[in-house]
Image (tube, helix red, strand yellow):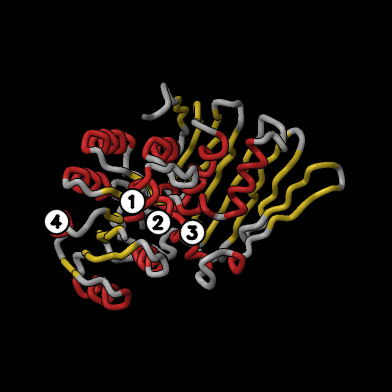
Amino acid sequence: MMKFGLLGCGGIAKEHLAAAARHRRIKFVHAVDVRLDVAQALADEYGVEKVSQEAARVLNDDEVEAVVIALPTHLHYEWIVRCAKAGKHILTEKPLCRTVRDGRRALTVCANCGVKLGVGYMRRYIPTRGKARQLVQSGKLGRPVTWTVAQFDQRSDYYRGPGNWAWDMEKGGGIIMDGHIHDFDFATWILGPPVDLFAQSRWITDVVTAPTQASAIIRFHEGDTMLFGTSFQEGDFGQCIGPNSIVGPEGTIIFDGSGGFWWHYAPGKRRYYGLNWDSRRPAGIGSLWLFYKQLDSFIRLVEKDECDPRLATGPEALESLWLAEKVIAAGPDGRRSRMASKPS
């Protein structure tokens, strides 16, 4: 059994604990949060024996073999480095770090310290996403392909709230870094490393400092393209998922917003791939299965050096981070950015 420490007990932390509770080879033994009452409540709910207010105590806990970092984005670099130097293997929530520069430095430290690192892009484990990747990479759609994804949502303080770290330009990067980086990761996972992009980003409110609108055209090494757009609107328009499709010269994938998609493979012919959590094991955990499988992949990486392609590596996480960073920094006049070499 691998014993884990948890840094940060807000937001996504509960999903990690709930998934681990169903895994016979994982046990969380130490939980940390600056809000001691929050950490204690979560520890009581999931049977975590030790609770601390200072994250450094996990580093000195000899019982802890690996750490899940569920801290705000701007703290990832510091604690990846500190955990690595303490000899703890690391599964960090996305993104890898707030900047590519910090991401590169963090990977160097992990390599020098001989610790394993995984990055929490759990959406890779959605079975239908894996099927879409297989269809594209096997050439069923032909190549090159164009992936179009767009979304608008409620006002800019929706869910996060003004003053929240996630909407701070320096600490979080807003919806692009905190949410749409999943799209950038999906793109690089399917299409490979990016070559260049042209992007624009802007603010439609002074409530937050990170961009609330953005668009980009991204090119990849194999000639594929991603057309991306997002906007958080002022006023309550309700949630709306826009176009989401991958189009190739020989077929099309159209995502339906529920996790499933239609594959159009010939004139008048199509096939539907739906998402059914009830068919997954262990039964009864629903979408927590994604976190369960991610944790399972991570312990296999640590114990057996087995690399599940669904578990995002550090170098892979640098590619999506580069895209998010460049889109955020593009500004209202737009900017073209070219990747000089694949991040590593």
Amino acid type for the residue under numbered disc 3: Leu
Disc 2 marks which residue?
Answer: 295
Relative vertical location of residue 330 with respect to residue 46 in this rendering, above or below: above
Quarter of the picture holding the N terminus: bottom left
Q: Residue 91: which numbered mark, if any?
A: 1
The reply to whether callout 2 and callout 3 are in contact (CB within 8 Å) is no
Towards the viewer: 3 or 129 = 3
Disc 4 marks which residue?
Answer: 56
| Distance (Cα) linking label 3 and label 1 | 14 Å
Q: Earlier in the sequence, mark 2 or mark 4?
A: 4
| Distance (Cα) linking label 2 and label 1 | 8 Å
Disc 3 marks which residue?
Answer: 290
Amino acid type for the residue under numbered disc 4: Ala
Relative vertical location of residue 245 with respect to residue 34 in this rendering, above or below: above
| Distance (Cα) linking label 3 and label 4 | 29 Å
User: In the image, what residue occupies the spot 52% across and 40% down?
Assistant: 189
- In this rendering, which labeled residue sits more in front, label 2 or label 1? 2
Q: Earlier in the sequence, mark 2 or mark 1?
A: 1
